[in-house]
Image (cartoon, helix red, strand yellow):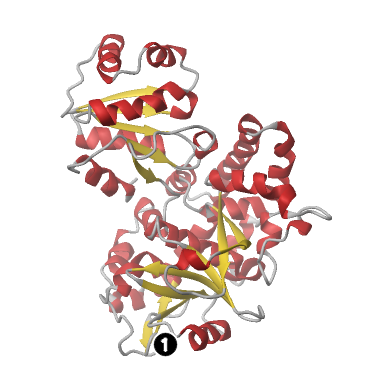
Amino acid sequence: MKRYAMDSLKRWKNSADRKPLMIYGARQVGKTWLMKEFGRAEFGNTLYVSFDKNERARQIFGEDIDPRYIVSRLENDFDTQIDPRRTLLIFDEIQECQRAKDALKYFCENAPEYHVVAAGSFLGVATGKFPVGQVNTLTVRPMSFYEFLEAIGRSRLLGALMGLDSKMILGMSQTASELLRAYFYVGGMPKAVQAYADTGDIRKTRELQEEMLDGYRGDFSKHIKGSDIPKVRMLWDTIPAHLAKEKKKFVYKEVKTGGRASEFENAMNWLENTGLVHRVSRTQHAKMPLLANLEREHFKIFMADIGLLCAHSGVDVKTLAQPEINIFDNFRGALTEQFVLQELKALLPKAPILYWANERGHSEVDFVFQYEGEIIPIEAKSSENARAKSLKAYMDAEKPARALRTSLKNFGAKDNLISVPLYMMGSLLEILDGKQGGGKGGAV
């Protein structure tokens, strides 16, 4: 499978001020495969060291973390030559060895010629210490819809979407919508995508998703202090119920009778830091810089992956075979919002993404994000009926230069409102950069 994160790895390799690279990501998002594939494609030799249940590897770093010593030991233990220019050093599951994490600092300061990539799940990494300012970082997320299309062999459709070929896209819009419907169930976890690509069996995919969810719940007890374990599980289990509400603001009293933020905040912060959920905070004033107007006490919670959300919510796989059921509108459009956030996170990994509500709370816009010195609102609709009263309220209040509306409706632009089909979210930045429409002409 092709992962677009590979492009980031290639840029890191060729960077003049390269530091050891720390790859973050929730468990099962494909970090190990990505690192090994990067080594295979870009280096003559790859030395892979995993610290998971590997006392021998931990012992090497326990004796001395000077890079010269570590390289020498690795050469001896693995019977290989480590050429700084041709060898990729991979330290996997690094959360299991604090000394290995400490060693990244010395590779940065004393041996920058080596190509060192480290990875670990957020579940463990979030609880450890890393050298600040002495590593480059990359977050690997679930596969996007475009990556999904590539994996299942729909290259012709993908080429049209990425090339912004409006005539071709119009002719393939029904196919694109059907494949997006499948993606809502399969999601972007690589094992689930691979199973679907190989077999087309949505039930096999669901089995894998349920195994992943069971694994995450088991991991909670490994990395959280005992008193917080039940709180994290309660928060985790109530995510679908919160997203099913008309107003999706997270309310602690709905987790537990009488529940308060002070009781659950540590557990919520931990769950967010694992990368398994995204907290989207509110703003009532979408001004630059966006984070200066963040209201952290008001927020919505989404999961890292839409397929896992479907499995976690118990969305019946039989629904996929019933086109008369609008999966995009499932539990009040929550899946559509989850999808849009997931695509935004893939496109803009470091940009702040909030939601907007007016002072009285009568109007809400699903997301606002910062891009190229501009704050852009985006309203996610679950069908072709794309009326958006809240978006109009936002535009009247905030006077944005441009606004976005995404639904199953075809691409179009009128004045400063751009309509983007859900299945074209992966081309959003190109659209904003004016490569198709950009707000000029066309009917919405």
Horizontally, is 249 left or right of 127 in the view? right
Dot 1 alpha-carbon crowd within 10 angstroms: few under 14, some 14 to 19, many 20 or more: some
Taking the spot 46% from the left edge, 80% from the top edge, the residue there is 409
* Residue 249 x, y percent position in the rendering: 66, 65
Relative height, residue 216 to residue 162 (above, below)? above
Q: Position of residue 393 (x, y in %)?
A: 55, 86
Look at mark 1 in the image and give the residue it sits on: 444
Q: Quadrant of residue 356?
A: bottom right
Point out the image quarter for the N terminus.
top left
Who is closer to the viewer here, 294 or 159? 294
* Whole-percent x, y for residue 335 in the image: 57, 63
Q: Which residue sits furthest front? A: 292
Residue 402 to residue 46: above or below? below
Secondary structure under badge 1? loop
x, y (%) of residue 406? 46, 75
Disc 1 residue type? Val
Answer yes or no: is residue 90 visible. Answer: no
Q: In the image shown, does 180 or 51 lie closer to the viewer? A: 51
- Residue drawn at x 38%, y 86% is 416
Relative to 190, 77 lies left or right: left
- Furthest residue toward right: 257
> Which image quarter is the C terminus in?
bottom left
| Residue 78: quarter of image | top left
